[in-house]
Amino acid sequence: MEDEQDAADVARVLAGEAQRFEPIVARWQKPVLNLCWRFVRDEGRAEELAQEAFLKCFRSLGQWRRDARFSTWLFSIAISVCRSHLRRFEPLRDALGAAMLEELATEPHDERVAAGQRAERIRKAVADLPPLYREPLVVYYFHDEDLASTARILDVGEGTLKARLHRAREALRKVLKDLQ
Amino acid sequence: MNEIEDVLREEREIEPSPFFARRVMAMIRAETQFAPLPFPWKRIASAIVLLLVAIAAGLDAPEATLRAESAIAVVIVLVSIVTAAMTVSLLRRAR
């Protein structure tokens, strides 16, 4: 149903009715925003990136090939926007992240706080993975562990995706072991 | 490893701000306000025809004066075509 609505709205936008892009934004704003948020973990920044993704999508709407679902194409645009952003701000984020990890490792805490901090440490470790491993991991869990959809969004084969997910988990395990 | 998977599965969801869609649409409206400038193919085509006529006239001209006049016409038309193309390209970039 969503696919049909997307296709119909896109056709009307391409025919000159730019306002028909609004239902598309309304339908996909939350998933796109949450995808961006999983990459940058900052709500304000995620909103800016999601806006940029929609604008980019609007500009290149004519390039959407109907053989892929509209949402798959839109998510891949959002990932590319996040990738560019992270490439620009990676050094600053690394410095802040290292300080945060150090703080988390030294603070005394009770069990519940410890669990929360451990979760935070895992998320930080994911954010620190090289893009080649971070992106599959983030998109795979964002897409409820749907291997086929994740492979389509990242434009890689399922075998490649499985290998990258495996290496990402291994890298995470190693980082978290080193932190203990 | 289960702990890592659990954390990744249990991500909290965030909500878009109330004006998110409105802001996106405002950006899109601003962008579509200026319709893309069409390239003046018709004018360029007529200029090229004119150019060919001038060249042909110059080649057929019996006198040196006529040939020179035809060459000037060719240069003028060529300069016009290049100027038109550059103007359109600059305007498109400015937008």
Image (cartoon, grey):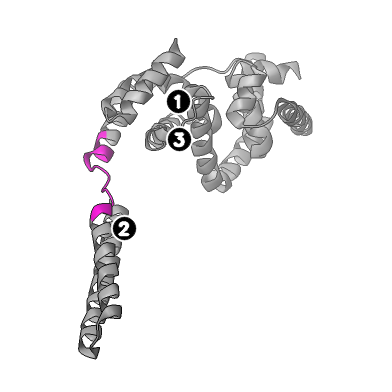
Residue A55, x across and y down, in percent = 37, 35
Residue B47, x across and y down, in percent = 24, 63
Residue A34, x across and y down, in percent = 49, 23
Q: Circle 2 marks a residue in which chain?
A: B
Question: Given this view, does label 1 or label 2 mark the residue nearer the observer?
Answer: 2
Question: Quick one: label 1 or label 3, which is nearer the N terminus?
Answer: 1
According to the picture, the residue beneath numbered tag 3 turns out to be A63
Question: In which image quadrant can residue B7 be found?
Answer: top right
CA–CA distance in space, label 1 to label 3: 22 Å
Circle 1 crowding by C-alpha within 10 Å: few under 14, some 14–19, many from 20: many
Residue type at mark 3 is Gln
- With respect to residue A164, does A69 lie above or below? above
Of A146 and B41, which appears nearest the observer?
A: B41
Q: Circle 3 marks a residue in which chain?
A: A
Residue under the point 60% across and 43% down:
A94
Q: Quadrant of the N terminus of chain A?
A: top left
Q: Name the secondary structure under disc 3.
A: helix
- With respect to residue A127, does A32 lie above or below? above
Residue A21, x across and y down, in percent = 33, 25
A107 lies left or right of B17: right
Q: Name the secondary structure under disc 1.
A: helix
Q: Which mark is residue B27?
A: none
According to the picture, the residue beneath numbered tag 1 turns out to be A33
Residue type at mark 1 is Leu
A173 lies left or right of A26: right
